[in-house]
Amino acid sequence: MNTLMILSGGAAQGAGSNAVFIIGYVLFLVLIVYFLFVKPSKKQRKEQEDLMASIKPGDTIMTTSGFYGTVIGMDEDTVIVEFGNNKNCRIPMHKKAIAEVEKPEAAYKEDEEEKSSKKVGKKKED
């Protein structure tokens, strides 16, 4: 009878450690899923919201379908975009269809940097 009690006591301890291991393993998997899928998607959603909030008339945009245009008017959810040099090609579209925004100031700064780097390059050649 002593051997039966010893065996049953050992089985109870083994079952307890198995339960702790399984719970720990499940928690580990949940943390991996959170850090690989949930957290990056929250970050991307916040960046998209910030992008939509920063859009102003005069900004150059690229749509999700790859068209480039200039914002000429805005509502809460709708943006009127002018595509190309044709003043008659003005299309209202949803803000969520905007993939990238380029501010006019950023384009001006890039042009200035390119000009200054070309001037420096010419001086070195002389």
Image (cartoon, rainbow, N blue to C red):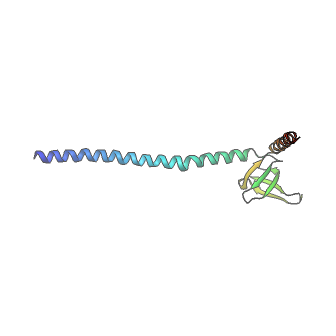
- Measuring from the top left, give residue 6's x and y in whole percent: 16, 44
Q: How many marks?
A: 0
**Can you give x and y, in whole percent of width and height, for residue 55 in the image?**
77, 46
Q: Nearer the viewer, residue 117 or 94?
A: 117
Q: Residue 20 lies in what quarter of the image?
A: top left
- Figure quadrant of the C terminus: top right
The picture quadrant where one finds residue 9 is top left
Q: Residue furthest front?
A: 126
Answer left or right for 124 relative to 39: right
Q: Position of residue 84 (x, y in %)?
A: 85, 58
Residue at 53% from the left image edge and 49% from the top image edge: 36
The vertical placement of 66 against 16, above or below, is: below
Seen from the viewer's position, the closer of residues 103 and 57 is: 103
Q: Is residue 10 left or right of residue 47?
A: left
Above or below, comparing residue 62 to residue 10 in the picture: below
Q: In the image, what residue occupies the spot 64% across and 45% down? A: 46
In the image, 87 versus 35, the foreground residue is 35
Residue 8 is at least partly visible in this image:
yes
Q: Is residue 76 visible?
A: no
Q: Is residue 100 left or right of residue 38?
A: right
- Residue 103 percent location from the top left of the image: 79, 45
Residue 90 in the image: above or below residue 41: below
Farthest residue toward the left? 1
Question: With 113 as the anchor, is 8 left or right in this view?
Answer: left
Please report the residue visible at 72 percent of the width from the left and 47 percent of the height from the top. Answer: 52
Image point 19% across, 47% down: which residue?
A: 8
